[in-house]
Structure formats: C-alpha cells, structure tokens
Image: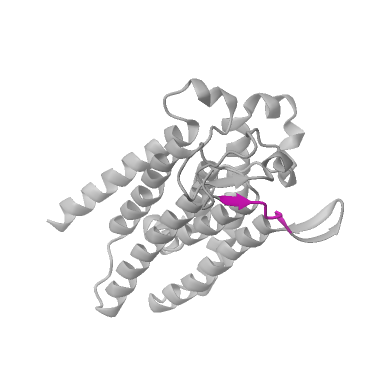
Amino acid sequence: MSVAQIIWNVSPEFLVFSDSYAIRWYGILFSLGYILAYAILIQSFKKERIPHIMLEKMTLAAIIGGVVGARLGHCFFYEPIRYLHNPIEILFVWQGGLASHGGAVGVLIAFWIVIRKSEYSYSFLLSRAMLVVPLTGACIRLGNLMNSEIYGTETTLPWGFIFERSAEVGAHIEQAVPRHPTQLYEAGAYFLVFVVLQLLYWKSIRFNNPIKTNLIIGIFLLGIFATRFFIEFFKANQVPFESAWILNLGQILSIPFILYGMYVLFVYKFQKK
C-alpha cells in the first residue's frame, strides 16, 4: 500500500450529547447546503424582482419534497421487500437511507404544487432553483464522506481512501482496502456544475441578456446526472442485487434525466437558430 493513500477514520458525529443522541456531520452539511442555496437565491430573486415569498415557499417545498422523496426513493428502489413488510420503518429516517433520485422527483412535485398557481411559469422558477441545487448536492456528498458511506470500488491510485469506520455504519466492506473516494468525485463535479451555471447566469445579468430557461435546465440535468452515471462505474454496489446487472440502479435511474437534458438542449439550440 502506498503511503500516499489516505486512512479515513473521521467520526460521523460532530457533537455527542448521549449514547442515543448526537449531532452528526451529515445533518450539518445537509443543512448547510440548503442555507447556502437560499442565501444565493435571495440575490438572484432580487435581481429579477421575484417576490421573496415565492422563494420561501420554494425553499420549504424543496426541504419537504426532497426529504420525503429521497426517503421513499431509498425504501422502494433499494430495499422494497424490507419496507413493504415493515412499512412503519419508512418513517425511521434517523436510521439512514436517502436516495438522491427520489429526492429529485420529490422536489419536482413539491415545486409544481407551490408554483402552479403563481404568475410565473414552472420551468422558469425551476431553472432558477437549479442554479444552486448542485451546491446543495456537493454538501450532501461531503456528508456521505463523513459517514463513510457511498464509497468506491478498490483502487491502487495514491488518493485511495481506507474507510476504517465503514463497519460502524453497517457497510459490507473489506477492511484495509483502499477505495475510490467517490463522494469527493461527485462533490467536486457538482461544485463545478454550480460554478458554470453561476458564471452563465451572472454574466447574463451583467449584460442585461436574460439566460434561456432551457439552457439552465439542460446544463443542470446533463451536468449532474451524466456525471452521476459515469462515477457510478467507480462505486461499490449499494445493494446485493446490483452485482448481477450491467448498470447499477443509480445509473438506470439517471438515464431519463440525461435523455431529457439532451432533449432540452436540442430545443434550446433549435430555438436559438
């Protein structure tokens, strides 16, 4: 093993109050992602003179829709048999288990509920939210790193991580085996998408040339889900049944988002002509 490889033994708990209660890094980073997104959107909404009450409604919708959708997505995509036999455990969010694809669907539905009766189009406000969602996603992936979860396959690369605490979070992993830090791969990629979208948006504001809704949506969908699709090749399987598949569940669930992103960018290019 190369000395450059990293021993990852960080505690997932930020502050421990008792054996049954602690503040975890995941919760802090999850919350930080939403707070930063909200703070940035305040400025965007001011520039475009969108009422602040709409931002508040969308933020609440994103929190509720995101958590509910992510929880249901995990329960029914990754462990359906367990939760169909014990449906009450769906409510036990503190036991872990959130799926980002389910969270995405949950947010889309929640946004539709709060936007449909407003004076703004659904796609317009959705595109504004997409300007900051990648930053939230990056924070959440850092939370996964602090939990020593959603790690990668074995690697001999010098930046491989040995997740010593993996057994503590219920993961099945061989000890002392360097693995791809896929949490960092995703966090970095999502942050890059965030930077690209922010540069495009604020450039359009500066030159008084409103950015097209389809361009934002297309870049977001391709940037996030194509990245997710690619990085999944370096991830360890999340559930046993994926071992027999060519593509894992995360990749399969990403395909509809990728295809729609390609379609939206095609429409944007056609309209531009």
Residue 273 included in the magenta stretch of the image = no
Residue 31 placement: quadrant: bottom right
* 191, 162: nearer the viewer: 162
Q: In the rendered image, is residue 197 in sight?
A: yes
**Looking at the picture, how far across and down is residue 121, in whole percent?**
38, 59
**Would you place residue 104 above or below residue 14 in this image?**
above
Span shown in magenta: 6-13
Seen from the viewer's position, the closer of residues 181 and 192 is: 181
Residue lying farthest to the left in this orientation = 273
157 or 201: which is nearer to us? 157
The reply, left or right, for residue 75 in relation to residue 48 is: right
Q: Position of residue 117 (x, y in %)?
A: 48, 58
Count how many numbered circles sit on residues in the image: 0
Asked if 228 appears above or below 133 in the picture, the reply is: above
Extreme residue toward the right, this view: 18
Relative to 167, 125 lies left or right: left
Residue at (42% x, 64% y) in the render: 119
User: Can residue 109 be seen?
Assistant: no
Q: Residue furthest top?
A: 244
| The C terminus - image quarter | bottom left
Q: Position of residue 16 (x, y in %)?
A: 81, 59
